[in-house]
C-alpha cells in the first residue's frame, strides 16, 4: 500500500508478485485500479469483478470508473458501461450522468422520461443533475405541476433558500406569490387565521392549507381543528384530501392520548382498513382503560391484524376487566394459555396470569460439518478471518456483513452464525441469526458475554445481573466498539456527556470518549448510570429502562399523567415506539438471562414494579 500511495508502480509490481495467493491480495489490485483509472481499460475493471465477485468494494470501484468517464465527457462509453454493469447503481450523481449520456447520444425522450424521480425530492441534488433538469424544464413534457411539486417538498423540509431559487428559476410568475405565501405560513402557521388570504380556489391553495393545518396542530391543536372545519366549508377538498388531514389530526391526538383521540380516529378510519390507525386506536383505548370499547373496536378490525399476540393479549385483558361471566373469563384464560407457549413479552405476561413457568423454547441450530467447511472456505470469510487476526475489526466486519446481507441464503446464514460463535465474534453471530430470521438458538442469540465484568459491576451497583446483561444485549449486541447515530458508545451505549457526568459522580478516572469503547471502562460507567436510573424510579426496571433509553425527564413527564395505570398498560402506552419496544425487549431478555444465570423463582414483572405511584413519589 505504501508503494501505491507513493505511485511507485515498479516497486508495487515486485511486491504484488510476492503476495500472489495471499488472501488479502485483492485489496492491492483494487487500490491499484483506483489509482490508475486514466491508464486502465474497461476490461480490467470487469475482469476484477469476475475474479472477486464477493469483494465488498466492487460497487465503489464501478462508481469511481463511471465518475472518471463522466469527467472525460465520454458519454457514449459512459452509457455503454453503465448499462452493462452487473450491479445496480443508486448514486444520484451517476444516475444523472447516465440520463445526460442518453441525452447526448440522441435518446432525448428516454432521458427526459426518467428525470422526474430525481427531480421530485425535498433537497438539493448534485450538480451532475443540472444539465438534465435544465433540458427537462425546457421541454414540452415539463409543466408547472412538476415545478410546484418540488418547491412544495422543499418548503415542507424548511429549506427556504432553495425553495426561493427553485421558484425563481422554474415556477411560472403567477405562482411566485403562492410560493411566498407557502413559505410565510410554513414559518408561522398562525397566519392560517387570515382566512381571506387563502380563499383562492385552486389545488395549490388547498395544498398550502393542508400542510399548514398539520403544522398548526403542534402549536395550537384547538385552533387547527376549528380552522380545518372552516376551510372545508370554503374549499372543495376531495375525499382523499380530507382523509389525509383527518388521519394526521387523529395521529397527533392519539400519540398524546388526548381526550379527542377516539373521535378523530373513528372519523379518519370508519371502515377500520388502515392498520396504522387500528394500532393507535387500540393503544389509545388501552391507555384510557376503555375495555368494552377495546373489544368493540377489536371485533371490527381485520383478522390478519388482530391475530397478532399483542392485540390478543389485550383482548384477554379487556375481557377480564369488562366481564364477570364465567364463559368470557374462560375465553380469556384460553387466550392466555395459547400465548404463554411463546417466548415473548406477551407470552411472559400471559404465563404470569396463569402462574405458569416461562417457555424459552430453546433449539440449537443444526449445521453439518460439510456446510460449515464450505462456508468457512469462502474467500470473503477467509478475508474476514485474516482481518480479525490482524486486529482490523472494521475491515473484518465489512467483509462479513457484505456476505451476510448480499450473498447468503438462510442455510448459509445459519452456518455463518455457527462460525461466528466458534470465533467468539458474538455480535456477528447474533446478526446472522437475525438476518436468517432464526430465533430459537438462545446460546448464540443471548451469550453470557463479558460475564465476569458484568457480574462484578452488577453486584457493585446492586443491580439485577440479568437486567444488566439484557441492557447490554439490547444496546449493542455485545459489540464493544458500537457507535450509534447519536454518538452513544460501547457495550452499554453511553453518550460521552452522560459518561462524563457519571464518572464525576462516582469518581471514575474519565479522560475522553474513546475510553468508552473498552468494556473495562464502559461497564463500570454504564452500570453506575443504570443504578442511578433505578434509584430515581424506586427500583422499577421498566421505568429505569425507559429512562436509560429516552431520558429520565421524559419518563418523569409521562408518569405525571399515568402513575395510576397498571404496569402492563403503562408499558404499552409509552409514546415512543422505540422506547416501548426497548422496554419490552429488555424485560423479556431478563427472563432469558436469569434462566442462564441459574436464578430460581424468576419474576417477569416484580411485585413492587406494579406500583407506579411509588415511583412517582420517589421522583418527587
Image (cartoon, rainbow, N blue to C red):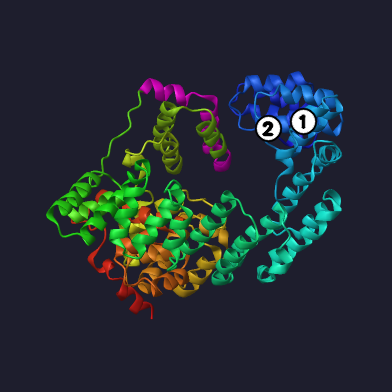
Q: Which mark is residue 66?
A: 1
Was residue 541 drawn as part of the magenta stretch in this picture? no
Residue sitting at 32 percent across and 41 percent down?
443
Q: Position of residue 606 (x, y in %)?
A: 25, 63
Q: Position of residue 557 (x, y in %)?
A: 44, 73
Asked whether 30 or 550 is in front, the reply is 550
- Whether residue 614 is visible here, answered yes or no, is yes
Tally the numbered discs.
Answer: 2
Q: Position of residue 151 (x, y in %)?
A: 75, 52
Specify the farthest residue to the left.
326
Considering the numbered disc 2 on the image, is that residue within a helix, a strand or a loop?
Answer: loop
Most frequent secondary structure within the magenta stretch: helix
| The C terminus sits in image quarter | bottom left
Given this view, does label 1 or label 2 mark the residue nearer the observer?
A: 2
Residue sitting at 87 percent across and 30 percent down?
73
Q: Which mark is residue 241?
A: none
Q: Is residue 412 above or below residue 341?
A: above
Q: Which mark is residue 89?
A: 2
User: Which portion, as a residue range, is magenta?
Assistant: 369-396
- With 102 as the anchor, is 438 left or right in this view? left
Amino acid at each position: 500500500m505504501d508503494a501505491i500511495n507513493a505511485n511507485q508502480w515498479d516497486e508495487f509490481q515486485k511486491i504484488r508478485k510476492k503476495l500472489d495467493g495471499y488472501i488479502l491480495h485483492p485489496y492491492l489490485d483494487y487500490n491499484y485500479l483506483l489509482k490508475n483509472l486514466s491508464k486502465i481499460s474497461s476490461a480490467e475493471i470487469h475482469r476484477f469483478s469476475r475474479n472477486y465477485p464477493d469483494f465488498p468494494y466492487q460497487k465503489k470501484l464501478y462508481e469511481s470508473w463511471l465518475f472518471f468517464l463522466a469527467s472525460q465527457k465520454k458519454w457514449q462509453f459512459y452509457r455503454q458501461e453503465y448499462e452493462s454493469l452487473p450491479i445496480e447503481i443508486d448514486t444520484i450523481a451517476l444516475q444523472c450522468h447516465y440520463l445526460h449520456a442518453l441525452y447526448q447520444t440522441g435518446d432525448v425522450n428516454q432521458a427526459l422520461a426518467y428525470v422526474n424521480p430525481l427531480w421530485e425530492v425535498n433537497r438539493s441534488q448534485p450538480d451532475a443533475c443540472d444539465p438534465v433538469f435544465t433540458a427537462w424544464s425546457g421541454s414540452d413534457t415539463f409543466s408547472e405541476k412538476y415545478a410546484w411539486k418540488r418547491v412544495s417538498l422543499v418548503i415542507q423540509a424548511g429549506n427556504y433558500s432553495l425553495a426561493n431559487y427553485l421558484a425563481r428559476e422554474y415556477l411560472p410568475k403567477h405562482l411566485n406569490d403562492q410560493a411566498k405565501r407557502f413559505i410565510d405560513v410554513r414559518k408561522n402557521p398562525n397566519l392560517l387565521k387570515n382566512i381571506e388570504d387563502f380563499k383562492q380556489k385552486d389545488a395549490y391553495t388547498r395544498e398550502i392549507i393542508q400542510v399548514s393545518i398539520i403544522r398548526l396542530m403542534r402549536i395550537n391543536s384547538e385552533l387547527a381543528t376549528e380552522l380545518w372545519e372552516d376551510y372545508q366549508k370554503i374549499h372543495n377538498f376531495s375525499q382523499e384530501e380530507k382523509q389525509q388531514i383527518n388521519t394526521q389530526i387523529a395521529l397527533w391526538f392519539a400519540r398524546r392520548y388526548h381526550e379527542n383521540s377516539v373521535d378523530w380516529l373513528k372519523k379518519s378510519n370508519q371502515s377500520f382498513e388502515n392498520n396504522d390507525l387500528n394500532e393507535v386506536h387500540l393503544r389509545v383505548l388501552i391507555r384510557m382503560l376503555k375495555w368494552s370499547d377495546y373489544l368493540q373496536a377489536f371485533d371490527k378490525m381485520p383478522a390478519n391484524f388482530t391475530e397478532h399476540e399483542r392485540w390478543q393479549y389485550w383482548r384477554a385483558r379487556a375481557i377480564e376487566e369488562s366481564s364477570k361471566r364465567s364463559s368470557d373469563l374462560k375465553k380469556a384464560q384460553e387466550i392466555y394459555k395459547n400465548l404463554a407457549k411463546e417466548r415473548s413479552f406477551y407470552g411472559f405476561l400471559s404465563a404470569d396470569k396463569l402462574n405458569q413457568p416461562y417457555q424459552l423454547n430453546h433449539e440449537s441450530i443444526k449445521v453439518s460439518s460439510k456446510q460449515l467447511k464450505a462456508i468457512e472456505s469462502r474467500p470473503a470469510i477467509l478475508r474476514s478471518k485474516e482481518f480479525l487476526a490482524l486486529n482490523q475489526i472494521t475491515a473484518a466486519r465489512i467483509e462479513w456483513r457484505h456476505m451476510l446481507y448480499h450473498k447468503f441464503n438462510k442455510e448459509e446464514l445459519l452456518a455463518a452464525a455457527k462460525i461466528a460463535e466458534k470465533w467468539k465474534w458474538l455480535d456477528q453471530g447474533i446478526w446472522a441469526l437475525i438476518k436468517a430470521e432464526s430465533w430459537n438458538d438462545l446460546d448464540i442469540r443471548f451469550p453470557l458475554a463479558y460475564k465476569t465484568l458484568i457480574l462484578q459491576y452488577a453486584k457493585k451497583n446492586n443491580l439485577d445481573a440479568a437486567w444488566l446483561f439484557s441492557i447490554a444485549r439490547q444496546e449493542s449486541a455485545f459489540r464493544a466498539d458500537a457507535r450509534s447515530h447519536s454518538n452513544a458508545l460501547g457495550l452499554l451505549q453511553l453518550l460521552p456527556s452522560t459518561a462524563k457526568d457519571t464518572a464525576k459522580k462516582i469518581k471514575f478516572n474519565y479522560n475522553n470518549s474513546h475510553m468508552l469503547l473498552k468494556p473495562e471502562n464502559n461497564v463500570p460507567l454504564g452500570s453506575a448510570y443504570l443504578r442511578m436510573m433505578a434509584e430515581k424510579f424506586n427500583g422499577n426496571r421498566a421505568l429505569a429502562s425507559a429512562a436509560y433509553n429516552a431520558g429520565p425527564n421524559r419518563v418523569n413527564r409521562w408518569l405525571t399523567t399515568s402513575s395510576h395505570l397498571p404496569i402492563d398498560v403503562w408499558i404499552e402506552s409509552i409514546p415512543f415506539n422505540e422506547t416501548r419496544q426497548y422496554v419490552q425487549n429488555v424485560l423479556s431478555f431478563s427472563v432469558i438471562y436469569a434462566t442462564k444465570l441459574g436464578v430460581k423463582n424468576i419474576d417477569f414483572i416484580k411485585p413492587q414494579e406494579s406500583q407506579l405511584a411509588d415511583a412517582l413519589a420517589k421522583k418527587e
